[in-house]
Each structure stands twice: as structure tokens, then as C-alpha cells.
Image (spheres, helix red, strand yellow):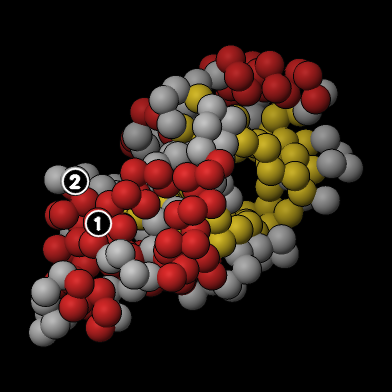
């Protein structure tokens, strides 16, 4: 059995620890800092055998070297981005399946936020680690990629089973909600989810994980093909990509 543990760190980051409850093996996803991971692993008597990096930004790879030194663990990162993943021991390619903690994880490239961004998906338990590509009610900023790359990457994610749990790397949901409702005020699914977010927000609240189904129903960035969104943006004749691009620019300046 797999358990996913969330460790909130820094201002709004999540570090994820994948635990095999039988073997007590563990893998760390996007370790920003080391101390909370070390303390958690020791408290649960876990053996950290792997690190999974979705991309190279410092708040996702900052603890790679120290964890590797302490636990002698493998570090998985995208082969095309190996020069930016510290301590990498296993280069992965898009379409590859790797075994972590006794379970298979499928790797797919999803450029946009960075050019070397990937996701890790466990099909058995329907668990996705989306890094900074897909958030609840939002998507990542385009630091390196193009709007078309991000748009296509999000479409890849939405082909996964609707019940897939999405473990995203930042708690941006309240801000994303405020932006979304500033664009569309009458989307029932969004407003219902928004009530839940506002009622539960607090120091211990987490909107993670979300699901593919919830995001398809509520996330504007996944609905750029919808006439109701184009109408809300006063752009009924735009292409879906043009609508996405405009929405991303609006969010950048929100």
C-alpha cells in the first residue's frame, strides 16, 4: 500500500513523501529543504531510497545533495534537464516507467513552466505529482516555455483518469479562486468549491490533493475551449490557445 504524506514548507510549498507501508521504503518528491524530511523519516522509521524531481527550480531540488549524502538515495530527473538537477543518478525520459518503492510511476514531459518539467503518475493508485504545471484552479507561470507548450501539457494531464488525485507543489488555491471568480462569477461548480475553500482556509488547511474531475469542472485554464469562458472574456472568436494565452497574462497581473 502507498501512503502520500504532505509536508508544508517555506511559504506555500509542499514536499511529498511516498511511503510503502509494507517495506517502509520512502521516496521524496521535490525536496525544497532537508530538515523536515529527515525528521519525518526518522519519526516514522522510513528508509528514503529515492528522490523524484519534477523540475529544476531551487524550491524543488534544494535538498537533493544533503538527502543523497545522508540516505544514499537515487535521484530521478529528466534527462533533458540533467545539468540543472543536482545529484541526479537516474536520468528519465518521457514515456518511461520507473519503479519507486515497489510501485510503477509513468513519466511524461510537460513543458511550459520550465522546458524540462515532467510529471510522475502511478496508474495503480491513480496518483499524479504535477509539480508546478497544474494547481488547483490554476496552472504554472511560463518562465521558460510558450503558451502553446503549457496548453498542450495541460491537455496531456486531462487525459488521465478523472479520479486521479493531483498532488501539486504550491498552495495557491485561494488566490486562484479569487482570480477565477473575478473572470466568471456564475460557474456553479467553481462557486461550490469556493465556498468549501473559504470555509476551511486556515493555518492547517490544505486543498491538496485535487482530482482531474474537479479541475475539469472548476479550473478555467482547462476550459479554454468553452464558449462560456470566451464570452466572459469578451472574446467569442478567439482560438482556444488565444483564450488560454490571454487568461495566463491576466493571472500574471492579477
Which residue is rendered at x = 17% and y = 64% of the image? 245
Q: Judge left or right: residue 248 versus residue 49.
A: left
Q: Nearer the viewer, residue 78 or 6?
A: 6
Numbered mark located on residue 254 in the image? 2
Q: Look at the image and tell me whether residue 151 can be seen.
A: yes
> Circles 1 and 2: CB distance less than 8 Å?
yes
Q: Nearer the viewer, residue 137 or 85?
A: 137
Q: Judge left or right: residue 192 versus residue 186.
A: right
Give the mark toward the camera: 1 or 2.
1
| 193 vs 241: above or below | above
Q: How much space separates mark 1 and mark 2, taking CA atoms?
A: 10 Å
Q: Residue furthest right?
A: 22
Q: Look at the image and tell me whether residue 106 can be seen.
A: no
Which residue is rendered at x = 75% and y = 44% of the image? 3
Which residue is rendered at x = 72% and y = 64% of the image? 124
Label 1 sits on residue = 182
Which residue is rendered at x = 47% and y = 26% of the image? 32
Q: Dot 2 surroundings within 10 Å: few (below 14), some, or many (20 or more)? A: few
Amino acid at each position: 500500500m502507498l501512503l502520500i504524506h504532505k509536508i508544508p514548507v517555506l511559504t506555500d510549498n509542499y514536499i511529498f513523501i511516498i511511503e510503502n507501508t509494507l517495506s517502509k521504503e520512502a521516496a521524496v518528491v521535490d525536496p525544497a529543504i532537508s530538515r523536515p524530511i529527515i525528521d519525518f523519516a526518522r519519526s516514522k522509521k522510513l528508509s528514503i531510497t529515492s528522490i523524484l524531481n519534477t523540475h529544476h527550480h531551487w524550491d524543488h531540488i534544494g535538498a537533493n545533495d544533503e538527502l543523497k549524502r545522508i540516505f544514499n538515495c537515487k535521484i530521478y530527473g529528466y534527462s533533458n534537464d540533467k545539468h540543472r538537477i543536482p545529484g541526479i543518478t537516474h536520468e528519465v525520459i518521457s514515456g518511461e516507467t520507473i519503479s519507486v518503492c515497489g510501485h510503477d510511476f509513468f513519466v511524461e514531459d510537460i513543458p511550459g513552466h520550465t522546458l524540462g518539467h515532467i510529471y510522475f503518475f502511478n496508474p495503480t493508485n491513480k496518483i499524479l505529482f504535477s509539480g508546478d504545471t497544474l494547481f488547483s484552479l490554476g496552472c504554472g507561470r511560463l518562465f521558460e516555455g510558450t503558451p502553446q507548450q503549457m496548453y498542450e501539457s495541460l491537455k496531456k494531464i486531462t487525459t488521465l483518469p478523472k479520479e486521479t488525485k493531483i498532488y501539486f507543489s504550491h498552495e495557491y488555491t485561494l488566490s486562484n479562486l479569487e482570480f477565477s471568480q473575478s473572470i466568471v462569477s456564475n460557474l456553479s461548480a467553481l462557486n461550490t468549491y469556493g465556498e468549501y475553500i473559504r470555509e476551511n482556509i486556515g493555518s492547517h488547511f490544505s486543498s491538496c490533493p485535487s482530482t482531474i474531475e474537479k479541475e475539469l469542472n472548476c479550473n478555467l485554464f482547462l476550459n479554454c475551449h468553452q464558449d462560456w469562458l470566451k464570452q466572459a472574456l469578451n472574446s467569442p472568436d478567439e482560438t482556444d490557445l488565444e483564450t488560454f494565452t490571454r487568461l495566463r497574462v491576466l493571472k500574471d497581473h492579477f
